[in-house]
Image (tube, grey):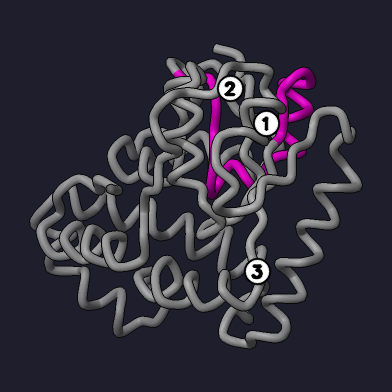
Amino acid sequence: MAIKVIGAGLPRTGTASLKSALEILGYNECQHMETLFNNPHLVDYWVELFKTGTTDFDALFDGFKSTTDFPGALLYKELLGKYPDAKVILGVRDPEEWYESASRTVYAFTPKTFKQKLKLLPKKLKSQRFRNIAKTLRMVEVYLWKDFFEGEFPDKAKTIARFKAFEEEVREHVPSEQLLEYQLGSGWKPLCDFLDVPVPKDAYPHRNQRDKFIAQLSKMMSSGGQLKIK
């Protein structure tokens, strides 16, 4: 299935809310990092895309019309190369607020040290579900924290500089008529104007607030259950 909308915003720029919004507007299903924790077979396609620049796109996006969040945001060039008519949405947020949010959520819950990974080992040995979770987290560690942020995410100044540089890169690479810079909290109108669809009567979704996200991640890491971002 051809992807119609590519979310180029990094994690914690409103990507879960955008996922819900796109699905309400008919661009469903929308693939998000949440999807990979619950469908770990998709991870192999993304890893192949990172490594080679291509993959079995039909298998990766079977049943999907859009994508937001990691890993798709980092691979927006490859996705746009495959789907040149797709529209691109760059989620933007105050860099200081973004860093604080990312630090306390996605970064904090990704096992990076030997001690953190060792803690998961007994669960992995007993449960395929935990092996799948670890597989997905490994992709996050390698391609987001180690590659994209060059292993320097704790250096706030460098990370914010990389965040800003990425935004500029998207602006320069994507044709202006195909790009929407969507400010966190802007509601339906700019999104619907960009996609040329009617504004829904219901309020714009507000998902994945920090406390709820932390609670859901904690539950998944302790029980091995599915990640259900609310």
Task: Depth check: give the residue in front, 122 or 10.
Answer: 10
Tell whether label 1 touches label 2 (CB within 8 Å).
yes
Instruction: Name the residue tied to disc 3.
Output: 94
Residue count near mark 3 (Cα–Cα under 10 Å), binned few <14, some 14–19, many ≥20: few
Q: CA distance from mark 3 to mark 1?
A: 33 Å
Instruction: Name the residue tied to disc 1.
Output: 54
Q: Is 129 left or right of 148, judged from the image as shown? A: left
Mark sitting earlier along the chain (3/2): 2
Q: Is 72 left or right of 167, judged from the image as shown? A: left
Asked if 229 appears above or below 55 in the picture, the reply is below
Q: CA distance from mark 2 to mark 1?
A: 8 Å
Tell whether label 2 touches label 3 (CB within 8 Å).
no
Residue count near mark 2 (Cα–Cα under 10 Å), binned few <14, some 14–19, many ≥20: some
Magenta span: 64-88
Q: Which tag is nearer the camera, tag 3 or tag 2?
A: 3
Task: Depth check: give the residue in front, 59 or 9.
Answer: 9
Residue at 75%, 29% in the rendered image: 80
- Check the picture and name the quadrant holding the N terminus: top right
Instruction: Name the residue tied to disc 2.
Output: 57
Dividing the picture into quarters, in which one does residue 66 lie?
A: top right
x and y percentages locating residue 19 in the rendered image = 46, 36
Q: Secondary structure at mark 2?
A: helix
x and y percentages locating residue 221 in the rendered image = 20, 63
Residue at 41%, 36% in the rendered image: 203
At label 3, which amino acid type do we have?
Asp
Asked if 97 appears above or below 88 in the picture, the reply is below
x and y percentages locating residue 146 in the rendered image = 59, 69
Q: CA distance from mark 3 to mark 2?
A: 33 Å
Q: Is 124 left or right of 146, judged from the image as shown? A: left
Confirm whether the magenta stretch covers residue 203: no
Q: Secondary structure at mark 1?
A: loop
